[in-house]
Image (spheres, rainbow, N blue to C red):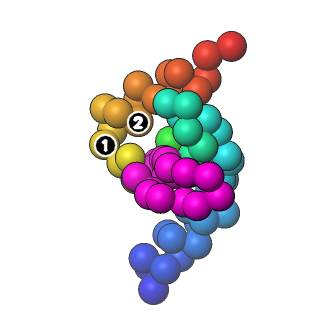
Amino acid sequence: MRRAAETAGLLAQASLTVEEVNAEPAVVLRVGRQLESIFVVSVEGDTITGIRVVRNPDKLAHIDRRLTLP
């Protein structure tokens, strides 16, 4: 029960945006202001050929700095 309440609270703070990461479309998941995951989509023509998930905190920190540059 405690875990369900905690998860519900996090979901209320979650946001998804579509950004460009390394010249590819990506879905960016943030919880509050914290970058949690990036789902990079590889596309060839009209077909999705792959989805790569980035969860490594060091890589996310690097990408987050690039996404928030003015």
Image quadrant containing the C terminus = top right
Q: Left or right: where does residue 42 sit relative to residue 68?
A: left
**Magenta stretch encompasses residue 62:** no
**Magenta stretch encompasses residue 49:** yes
Instruction: Identify the main secondary structure in magenta.
Output: strand
Instruction: Determine whether 46 is above or below 5 in the image.
Output: above
Residue at position x 44%, y 57% from top? 50
Q: Which residue is mark 2?
A: 60
At mark 2, the secondary structure is helix
Q: Nearer the viewer, residue 56 or 31?
A: 56
The percent coordinates of residue 48 (x first, y second) are 54, 60
Residue 6 visible here? yes
Q: Nearer the viewer, residue 22 or 16?
A: 22
Looking at this view, name the residue that lies furthest to the front.
45
Instruction: Determine whether 48 is above or below 37 in the image.
Output: below
Q: Label 1 vs label 2: CA separation?
A: 6 Å
Q: Nearer the viewer, residue 69 or 10?
A: 69
Q: Left or right: where does residue 39 sit relative to residue 27?
A: left
Q: Nearer the viewer, residue 9 or 22?
A: 22
Residue at position x 68%, y 47% from top? 17
Which span is picked out in magenta? Answer: 36-52
Q: Are marks 1 and 2 in contact (CB under 8 Å)?
A: yes
Q: Residues within 10 Å of mark 2 (few under 14, many from 20)?
A: some
Residue 31 visible here? no
At mark 1, the secondary structure is loop
The percent coordinates of residue 26 (x first, y second) are 57, 46
Q: Which residue is mark 1?
A: 56
Instruction: Determine whether 40 is above or below 66 in the image.
Output: below
Quadrant in the picture for residue 2: bottom left
Q: Name the amino acid, label 2.
A: Leu
Q: Which mark is residue 32?
A: none
Residue at position x 50%, y 22% from top? 65
